[in-house]
Amino acid sequence: MKKFKPKRVLIEHDALDYKLGQELEKKFKAEEIPIDYIKSHNRVRAEKEMSPIELFNWNKQTLVVGVKKTLKFKSCQPSADYRLVTSTSCPAKCEYCYLAKNLGSAAYLRIYVNLKEILKAVKKHIRKGRGEIITFEASSSSDPVAVEHFTGSLAKIIEYFAKQDKGRLRVVTKFANVDNLLDLTHNNHTRFRFSLNSSYVIKNFEHLTASLDERITAASKIQQAGYPVGFILAPLMIYDGWQDDYLDLLTELKERLVNPTSNNLTFELIMHRFSTRSKNLIEARFPNTKLKLDKEAYHHKGFGKYVYPPQQAKELKEYLTKQINDLFPKAEVEYFT
Ligand code: SF4
């Protein structure tokens, strides 16, 4: 797929005090992308009143270059101990995206240029573990692979973690431009996961992401480069023919992975869910969505959150776990939620 190119770039004044900020400014000027200069990456507004669809599209075509001020990391269960944020939002338009929901009208893409300061904060958080292994999720607020062609930050973070005895990095992506990461020294300290789904889900709901074929090719390259590899199957959906589609996906994965019998493969299983807030946002942004958001058909978990009823959730969990165990006997299913 073509790498993301924004329609407009906004650069925070302070970002130009950093080498990466200056390099990015030069790069975007050379590509003749319109640049504006702003005070704060937190207060970006479109120039005019827009409908929810227009605003969503405007956000997804806008790239903001800023400085990350908050260096106290939040918890990131069940995936990792902490969130490691070097960018916010992502250029894709997955209809169900929880990030796009959480960010609301501020779903514009942000990349942070003060990587050294962020990595210093990582060191502090590792120390807090008092000798325990501390894990960091690099994809809790964005898809870092989607902007790696601009920043090169993920490569630097992977190399940083390679040197940390007690720090481990976890990455997850729906993108495939991983070539600059293949020859790095990673020391097995980064687990690289690819978010996969059935072709029905990718086709209908995951707009502007890499195709399934591209993601599996990238996963194979990453496995060949020696990284611990994993897969997030999410959001798992029930629809006519879901069992066959998920079996096809797992079968293709097994056929194309360099080492499907590795004992260092992980799977994370997350079923489709929505909240009253996300339902409202999705219906405003994607009026013709095929996503099932009918509250009556789902189980209300409380706090306005909906998941599949217990019987269907059990069916999903048992079916997927069985197929994974059959096809990848040495893999670990880390959780189903
Ligand atoms: Fe959201 Fe991930 Fe899709 Fe980007 S790739 S829109 S972060 S779900």
Image (spheres, rainbow, N blue to C red):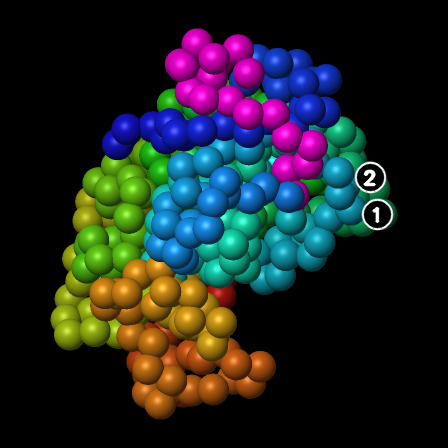
Query: Residue type at mark 2?
Result: Lys
In the rendered image, is residue 282 in sight?
yes
Residue underneath mark 2:
124
SS label for mark 1? helix
**Is ligand 1 within 8 Å of the beta carbon of the residue shown at mark 2?**
no
* Image height of 335 relative to 232, above or below: below
Front one among 318 and 4: 4
Left or right, 316 with reference to 14: left
Left or right, 196 with reference to 336: left
Q: CA distance from mark 1 to mark 2?
A: 6 Å
Residue underneath mark 1:
128
* Image height of 91 relative to 18, above or below: below
Q: Residue at x 40, y 15 (%)?
A: 32
Front one among 162 and 200: 200
Using the image, tell me which numbered label, if any, was put on residue 282.
none
Residue 114 rendering spot, x and y as whole percentages: 69, 27
Quadrant containing the N terminus is top left
Front one among 282 and 134: 282
Residue 37 included in the magenta stretch of the image: yes
- Which span of residues is magenta-colored? 25-42
Q: Are marks 1 and 2 in contact (CB under 8 Å)?
A: yes
Residue 188 included in the magenta stretch of the image: no
Residue 104 rendering spot, x and y as whole percentages: 52, 58
Query: Residue type at mark 1?
Result: Lys
* Image height of 239 relative to 328, above or below: below
Where is residue 88, by image quadrant? top right
Q: Residue at x 56, y 37 (%)?
A: 110
Q: Residue at x 42, y 87 (%)?
A: 299
